[in-house]
Image: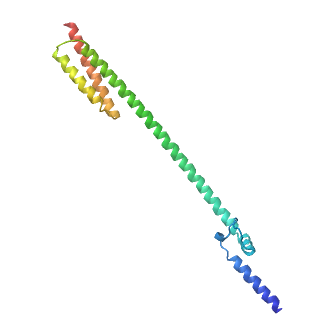
Amino acid sequence: MDAFMKFYALLTTLLLAGCATSPQDCNLHAEDPSFITKLSCATSGGYRQKVDNQERQILQSQRDNRIAQQNLADTQAREQASSQKLADEKSRLAAARSDLTQTLKKLKSVKSTNLQRQQEIRQLEALQRQSQQADSSSDVASLEAKIAAAKKRVAALENANMSQ
């Protein structure tokens, strides 16, 4: 009996030592775990807990990835909208400059010493220089309004010259 008790005590000690295995010690890919460690991990649920933790990490990573992809898509959409707005603004500015150049050419084409005409030419030339500094949509809108007003003044000048 004495030998049986020693064996029983040794077996109990080994099993209890194996039960003390934490989930961190339960590695499915460990190269050389002992039989007791394997048994302890299998019976205590250490392997299952390790797998559950890894599955939670994967699910969290997938959620984070979806959020990051959505953020990227939102950023790309904002960038595209900004690029389109900038292209539209550049187009408007180019059209305004062209309109201004045509109005100025039209005004200069008539050789006249009319003081009002000369003053209008100087104002249009100043507006042309100002158009080179336009860099925002409000600048472009202001420029468009000034050009429209200048075109009205030029048309009024031409009408006044024709009736004379």
Residue 36 versus residue 95 in the image, above or below:
below
The residue sitting at 77% across, 82% down in the picture is: 11
Quick one: 159 or 54, which is closer to the camera?
Answer: 54
Residue 16 versus residue 63 in the image, above or below:
below
The residue sitting at 67% across, 66% down in the picture is: 49
Q: Note whether residue 155 is visible.
A: no
Q: Quadrant of residue 54?
A: bottom right
* Left/right of residue 88 with respect to residue 70 in the rendered view: left
Q: Position of residue 106 (x, y in %)?
A: 28, 15
The N terminus lies in which quarter of the figure? Answer: bottom right
* Left/right of residue 87 with respect to residue 161 in the rendered view: right
Q: Quadrant of residue 103?
A: top left
Task: Work out which residue is located at the far front of the displayed protein and give it.
Answer: 31
Q: Position of residue 37 (x, y in %)?
A: 71, 73
Residue 58 versus residue 126 in the image, above or below:
below
Q: Quadrant of residue 108?
A: top left
**Render colour scheme:** rainbow
Number of callouts: 0
Q: Position of residue 129 (x, y in %)?
A: 26, 28
Q: Position of residue 76 (x, y in %)?
A: 49, 41
The residue sitting at 73% across, 70% down in the picture is: 42
